[in-house]
Image: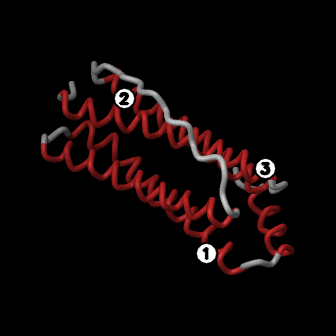
Amino acid sequence: MISPKIQDLLNAQLNREYSSSYAYLAMAAYVESESLVGFAHWLRVQHREELEHALKFYDYINAQNGRVTLAAIDQPRAEYKSVFEVFQKVLEHEKYITRSVNEIYGAAEAEKDYATKTFLSWFVSEQVEEESEAQLMVDKLAMIGDSKGSLLYLDKEAKKRE
């Protein structure tokens, strides 16, 4: 069984994951409106991953005889200056999620809640991958600058993400 403090932190993270999913879907809508369907695909994959993450928190809270509490999700940002700005925001957001997961892990460690630490270990590793993928996109977009041809090539490559 989890403590009330850990339950609150896990519920907050569950809601962050849903909010992340919604934000990535809004980003996908923006880039798709710019005819960048490969980047939209990349972001839709990210959207689905965040939904899966939210459900992992949902299931864990329930498995620990806790109570899931869903919160309202704010309307996500809909407009950006460029696809480069979109992926800068993706990277910034993934760093925020990493800090949040680490905070919960630290609280579980302080409470000697080994089950929650074990559960969160997967998320700690997952965030390394999430930040790495986002950083790679930011780096590639920075390299190509204003080259429309390179942007279209990278858009085609982004569509290959599974």
Q: Which residue is mark 3?
A: 32
First in sequence, mark 2 or 1: give its number. Answer: 2
**Of the two numbered discs 3 and 2 in the rendering, the one whose residue sits closer to the viewer:** 3
Q: Amino acid at mark 2?
A: Tyr
Name the side, left or right, on which 38 lies relative to 69: right
Identify which residue is drawn at 47% across, 56% down. Answer: 94
Mark 2 falls on what kind of element? helix
Marks 2/1: CA–CA distance:
35 Å
Label whose residue precedes the other's in the sequence (3 or 2) = 3
- From the image, tell me which residue sits under label 2: 60
Left or right placement of residue 50 versus residue 110 in this view: right
Residue at image position (19%, 45%) is 107
Q: Which mark is residue 5?
A: none
Would you place residue 7 above or below residue 161 in this image? above
Secondary element at image label 3: helix
Residue at point 57%, 42% (across, down): 76
Residue highlighted by disc 1: 139
Q: Position of residue 156 (x, y in %)?
A: 82, 62
- Residue 149: image quadrant is bottom right
Q: Quadrant of the N terminus?
A: top left
The mark that comes first in sequence, 3 or 1, is 3
- Disc 3 marks a residue whose amino acid type is Glu
- Whole-angstrom CA distance, mark 3 to mark 1, is 21 Å
Left or right of 154? Residue 60 is: left
As measured in the structure, the alpha-carbon distance from the residue carrying label 3 to the one carrying label 2 is 35 Å
Query: Tag 3: Cα neighbours inside 10 Å, few (<14), some, or many (≥20)?
Result: some
Residue 146 position within the rendered picture, expressed as x and y whole percent measured from the top left: 77, 78
Residue contact at pointers 3 and 1, CB within 8 angstroms: no
In percent of width and height, residue 117 lies at 26, 44
- Closer to the camera, 97 or 148? 148
Mark 1: which amino acid? Asp
Check contact, mark 3 vs mark 2: CB within 8 A.
no
